[in-house]
Amino acid sequence: MNQASLLLKAYYEALYELLEANRNVLITNAEVLLRNEIKNRNFQVSTPKKFAAYRDAAAAFLDERIETYNPIGFQYTLDQMPTSLARELELQLNWYNSEDEFLALTEAVQAKAVSDMPDNRLHQLTDELIAEMGAFPDKSIISAYHAKPALEKLPDYVVARAIEDIIST
């Protein structure tokens, strides 16, 4: 594993640990953001049952994000080379495009990676990377939502916002 791959792995592992440790706070914050966004945008969520469905979707998206960063399974994410059809389907299913954000993340990783990274330096670089880049793909989700807000995008959006709020504190 080269130094850039090691740093990228450390970035995802640090995000996993941070989000896993703050899962309950993230769920609470996402619910507050969800309520505020529904009210501010006048989205039609007319019953408690409908609100609960959006809240539950946000919690499920949070769990999915946490597992995406899980270091136990993360090597499979890096090792997979998706077919062109799989990549095309992924882009069609995501309502946001995170390609530029991932490119910026990998460029930042390349720029920060150095030949000698003892644990304390690796942790420092990882913290810098998270502070500068946030949690991938939050920037893409947030900007796409702001460009065209929609109720069906709300669970992803509130999770991304809650994660970025935790990172910035």
Image (cartoon, grey):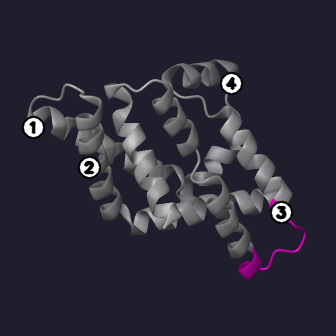
From what the image shows, is residue 131 above or below residue 103?
A: below
Circle 4 — which element? loop
Say whether residue 93 is left or right of residue 134. Answer: left
For the residues labelled 1 and 2, the Cα–Cα distance comes to 13 Å
Q: Residue 87, position in %: x, y? A: 64, 24
Asked if residue 92 is among those painted magenta in the image, a careful observer would answer no
For the residues labelled 4 and 2, the Cα–Cα distance comes to 37 Å
Q: Which residue bears the numbered disc 3?
A: 113
Q: Identity of the amino acid at label 3?
A: Ala
Q: Is residue 7 visible?
A: yes
- For residue 31, the mark is 2
Circle 1 — which element? helix
Q: Residue 25, position in %: x, y? A: 32, 63
For the residues labelled 3 and 1, the Cα–Cα distance comes to 49 Å
Q: Residue furthest right?
A: 115
Q: Identity of the amino acid at label 2?
A: Glu
**Magenta residues (range):** 112-121
- For residue 48, the mark is 1
User: Which is more toward the observer, 40 or 16?
Assistant: 40
Q: Identity of the amino acid at label 4?
A: Thr
